Amino acid sequence: MSKGKLIVIEGTDGSGKRTQSELLYKHLTKLHIKSAMMHVPVYESFTGELIARYLRNEFGRLNPYLAATLFAVNRFQFRDKIVNWLKEGRVVVLNRYVTANQIHQSAHLHGKEKAEFIKWIGKMEYEIFAMPKPDLTLFLNVPVLIASGMIKRKPAKERKYAFGGKEDILESDLMHQQEALKQALRMAGTDKNSRQINAAGKTALLPKAEIAAMIWSEVSKFLKIK
């Protein structure tokens, strides 16, 4: 595989993105496929500290254009690292990416305003900041009430940015999460490089291994691995 590939795991908060990103990366490594992984936003960074403060509600509700720019600049900080990984021919697994900005920051916008805003984020990140476009995006479809329950059970080590708190300003807003999920599924159904992974049953998240198997089915087809 001479050219690297960028694979993004997306979904609403509490859908299991971190776990599945790590499982995919471990599986690629086990198969001796050159790979790399990153969780974004990167909180342990100059802009990441501001994002953490925003999510802790220290600034109140920001205009979505301002909030989206903050997350985009955080990604841009690590653009060179991602690009270099791709140049090295690695399969790069990202937990969240530009699509997270689009589905979350557009959650309180509607109709034409929402569509224009999503395009604006794409122009900022892919054209102005020249972030590489994903080769494959996998959206984890998890009902909001199930995902909300998973957030409450997250270990404190994953909540450092929120000082160990259980929910941040976006996670605690179930209407926001519902709108974000609708937009995620809309994008999964219209983007030819995106796939939807139904990661939950009627009342609970499916077992980790079962979700990972569905993800690997899509990734192996994409990478042409038998």
Image (cartoon, helix red, strand yellow):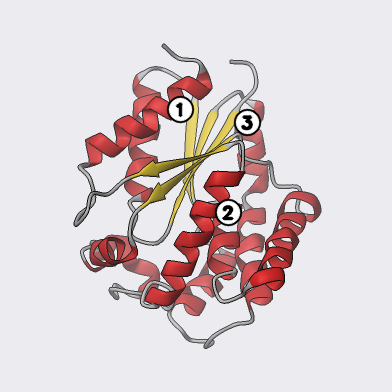
Q: Horizontal placement of 114 versus 108: left or right? A: right
Rounded to the nearest angstrom, the CA distance separating label 1 from label 2 is 18 Å
Q: What amino acid type is highlighted by mark number 3? A: Leu
Residue 138's tag is: none
Q: What amino acid type is highlighted by mark number 2? A: Thr
Q: Up-down: is 108 above or below 183?
A: below
N-term-proximal mark, 1 vs 2? 2
Label 1 environment density (alpha carbons within 10 Å; few <14, some 14–19, many ≥20): some
Q: Secondary structure at mark 2?
A: helix
Label 2 environment density (alpha carbons within 10 Å; few <14, some 14–19, many ≥20): many
Residue plotted at (35% across, 44% down): 198
The location of residue 135, given as percent across then percent down, is 61, 34
Q: Horizontal placement of 111 versus 197: left or right? A: right
Tell me the quarter of the picture where residue 59 sits. Answer: bottom right
Residue plotted at (66% across, 47% down): 79
Q: Is residue 103 visible?
A: yes
Which residue bears the numbered disc 1?
219
Residue plotted at (23% across, 68% down): 152
Q: Secondary structure at mark 3?
A: helix
Rounded to the nearest angstrom, the CA distance separating label 3 from label 2 is 19 Å
Q: Are marks 3 and 2 in contact (CB under 8 Å)?
A: no
N-term-proximal mark, 3 vs 2? 3
Q: Is residue 40 visible?
A: no
Residue plotted at (61% across, 36% down): 192
Q: Quadrant of the C terminus?
A: top left
Rounded to the nearest angstrom, the CA distance separating label 3 from label 1 is 16 Å
Which residue bears the numbered disc 3?
86
Q: Quadrant of the N terminus?
A: top right
